[in-house]
Image (spheres, rainbow, N blue to C red):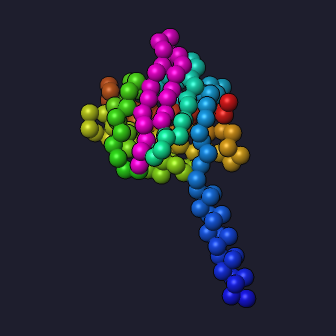
Amino acid sequence: MMRSTFTTLMLLCCSLFSASAADFFGTWNLNTAKSKAEGIQLPKQQTVIYSKTATGFDYKATGTAPTGEAISATFTYVKDGEEIKTTGFPNWDALIVKKGMDIKTTIQLKRKGEVIGTVTRVLQPGGMVMTLSAKLTLPDGKKASYNYVYDRK
């Protein structure tokens, strides 16, 4: 009886741990038909690649901005709570990631040292759809929000 209870508890703990780990690595395409934005324009096209590193992941976005200019944005996540400098994002220059390797991740957006918004990244059940929902203040002081839907390639 004791061994059976112990085994059940171990299996439960293992399944709970594995449920929080996310396999979001790979290539994602923005589904512009399912994505929405207010106060900010959607990219015409965007591809995001998450690549594993020894301690976290690299993020790289490419595509076409609403203005027709090329998108090229990157950052490297190492561990939760550290400020990460970003390149290529027009509305922020740094971010802080919490639960970066989980199914649900929260990200604080920063510009010139000030928090200007948050993003929640969620890997949907089945692992083929990922959403990024954000609320932020733009450099001109106006509020914006978006819900980007990405399909796994």
Q: In terms of secondary structure, what is the magenta stretch mainly?
A: strand
**Left-right relation of 59 to 116:** right
The residue closer to the viewer here, 38 or 57, is 57
Picture coordinates of residue 64, whole percent (x, y): 53, 16
Picture coordinates of residue 44, whole percent (x, y): 57, 18
Whether residue 3 is visible here, answered yes or no, is yes
The residue closer to the viewer here, 130 or 8, is 8
Picture coordinates of residue 137, whole percent (x, y): 37, 33
Quadrant housing the C terminus: top right
**As drawn, which residue projects farthest toward the front?**
54
**Total numbered badges shown on the rendered structure:** 0
**Left-right relation of 122 to 82:** right
Q: Residue at x 49, y 41 (%)?
A: 53
**Left-right relation of 72 to 50:** left
Residue 144 falls in image quadrant: top left
**As drawn, which residue projects farthest toward the left?**
113
**Left-right relation of 79 to 66:** left
The residue closer to the viewer here, 24 or 56, is 56
Residue 84 falls in image quadrant: top left
Picture coordinates of residue 73, whole percent (x, y): 44, 26
Q: Residue at x 51, y 26 (%)?
A: 61
> Does the stretch in magenta take in 62?
yes
Q: Which residues are magenta?
A: 58-79
> Does the stretch in magenta take in 60?
yes
Whether residue 36 is visible here, answered yes or no, is no
